[in-house]
Structures are given as C-alpha cells and as structure tokens.
Image (cartoon, rainbow, N blue to C red):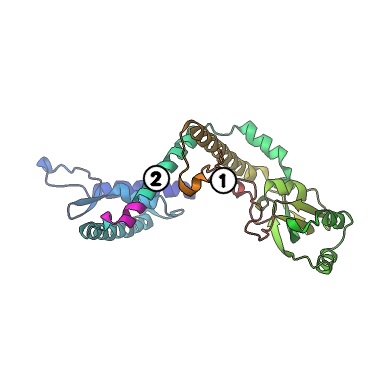
Amino acid sequence: MTSSKSRLALSVLATTLALGLSACGKKDDEKVATQVAARVGSEEISVHQINQVLSRTNTAGATPQAVQTMSREVLEKLIDQQLAVEQATETKLNRSPEVVSQLEASRRDILARAYMQKIAAALSKPTPEEIKKYHVEHPQLFAERRIFNVQEILVPAAAGVTEQLRGFASAGKSMEEAAAWLKSKDIKFGGGSATRAAEQIPLELLAQIHTLKDGQSVVIQGPQAVTLLRVASSQLSPIPEAAALPRIEQFLTNQRASEAVAANIKQLRSAAKIDYMGEFAKAEASPTAAAPAVPTTAQAPATDGKATTALEKGVAGLK
C-alpha cells in the first residue's frame, strides 16, 4: 500500500510541477505544459532530473505535499550543483587530467552497468513452480529455519591440525578443551561467538550446520584456515510460506541475472583479443578471471593470513 501511495505521490508531483511551471502568454491564453523546473543562466533543470533524484530517495508513505517539499529541496540542490559545474568549467577544471580520468571512469562504469542490466532485464522471471520447488528443497531456510548461537575456533591451515580438530568434534569435546590443546602445542588460533539466523549463513555452510544438534560441532576446511564450529544453542523460527515466496522469487531473479552476466562476460572474453602488457604480462593470466561483480551465496575463504569467520557473510539475496 505504501509503495502505491509513493508512486501516486510521484505522479502527482510530476503533474503538479508540469502544470505549475507551464508557460503563459500564448495566443488565446493557452497554457503550454513545460518540463523545465528552472533555468540557471542558459542551462535548464528539468522535472525529469528532479524525479530521477527522488526515485533514489525513500519516499515510502510520503504524502503528495511531503514529496513536493522534497522536490523543492532537490531542485535547490540541483541549482547549486549547476552553479558549481559552471564555475568548474569556467576555471577549466573539466580539462584537468584527474577530473577527465574520473569522468571517464564514471562513464565506463555507467555503460557497463547498463549493459549488465540489459542482460538481466531480458531474462524470464522465475515461475511459480520454480519458486515452490526452491521452498520445498530448502526447509532449513523456511519451514525448519533456526537461529543459531555458534562458537568458533579458527586455526591456520598450515598448522596441520585438521584431523585432530575433527577428532574433537566427533568426540563431542568442548571448545575449551580444544583451545587448551592448541595452547599446549603452541599453535596460534582465533575465535569467537555469534548469533546468526539461517539466512545469514552461506548456503554451503548452512547445509552442514542444519544437521547439527545443540552441543555438536563440525570442522570446516578452507584454503587458508580450518574452523572448528560448535552450535552452542539454537531456536526454531520458521518463516511462513506466504512471506517466503516473494523472497525466493527475488533471490532466484538475482541468481539468474548473476549467472547470465557471468556467462556473457566469459563469452565476450573468449572472443576478444586481450594482450597483457608490462609487468602484468609476466604473470600467467587466467582466461576466466576478472568477471563482473555479481551477487554470490558462497563465502570467500580467509585472506591475508587472517582467519575470516565462517559466518561473516550470508545469503544476501534472501534478506
């Protein structure tokens, strides 16, 4: 309801501005609607520019009067911006190497994003059957959703104690016992505790944690760190199907778009002639590297020698 009110408010705003700023003085006193909200010197600021800014603003629940007030504030800021642009141009800042470089970077980013959005927009939406199937196949996120209180001990993979940690987990040893053993071996480790809902846990990890009962542990092997994770306690907190289905639709939409963009860029890379130059030519380049930034449900392993908690990232598409 608030979304529809917001759209109505924006529509009323556009109409009001167009009519309120209409030109007069034509023959027979005919009023001609204009989309110009203001002129700064010879430059025009349009209603479209105002609405574009408002579209990026949270106007949920705002009345038409409130939105109109916001539009006036936006217009004043656009006027200030135009004055600054004119001064920057007059003082030739637009020709400085740093500004030119930033403008080009912004242009490249906008064009690349527009291309990726075009790919995503061409995709079909998930069907009701696909959404239902996902709901049934992932009860740990919905019907059997739990909120976990977990404890972690993180050890560098180079320490070579994976099997010993697995022994602690299978034997039901406490985290204190595991920590004491690591200290006795003079092995450095990190750790902590956290409370996480199921959707805040990476899907790959959630599949393992969901099978654990309170008090049980699991060992998670990563390239740079090994994690001993224990479910200290948990609480069942299911999500009703009616609330789950819209989230699943959005998640599947995001996932489908991510995969399509990645596949498209991979194809473009394979067809393009790419020459690595200078110091970058010394290292062997991966043919599939440098894919665009796209959402993912997988969690990145520890980097820079610092163990990253296994619960640091969740399923963003389901939030």
Give the residue drawn at x 53%, y 42%: 291
Q: Nearer the viewer, residue 71 or 8?
A: 71
Is residue 99 one of those drawn in magenta? yes
Label 2: element kind: helix
Q: Position of residue 273 (x, y in %)?
A: 46, 34
Mark 1 and mark 2 lie on one chain; the one further toward the N terminus is: 2
Marks 1 and 2, Cα distance to the nearest angstrom?
20 Å
Q: Are marks 1 and 2 in contact (CB under 8 Å)?
A: no
Is residue 259 one of those drawn in magenta? no
Q: Residues within 10 Å of mark 1 (few under 14, many from 20)?
A: some
Given the image, on which type of amino acid does mark 2 rest?
Answer: Arg
Q: Nearer the viewer, residue 211 or 59?
A: 211
Using residue 191 as the reference point, say whether residue 16 is left or right of it.
left
Q: Residues within 10 Å of mark 2 (few under 14, many from 20)?
A: few
Q: Is residue 240 above or below residue 194?
A: above
Q: Kindly identify which numbered label has been placed on residue 108.
A: 2
Q: Which quadrant of the view contains residue 186?
A: bottom right
Given the image, on which type of amino acid does mark 1 rest?
Answer: Pro
Magenta residue span: 95-102
Q: Position of residue 227 (x, y in %)?
A: 75, 56
Using residue 314 as the reference point, say whether residue 182 is left or right of it.
right
Q: Nearer the viewer, mark 1 or mark 2?
A: 2
Residue with the most extreme right position: 171
Magenta-drawn stretch, dominant element (helix, strand or loop): helix
Residue tagged by mark 1? 295
Label 1: element kind: loop
Q: Position of residue 88 (x, y in %)?
A: 25, 59
Give the residue drawn at x 35%, y 52%: 101
Using residue 81 as the reference point, say whether residue 119 is left or right of it.
right
Q: Position of residue 301 (x, y in %)?
A: 66, 52
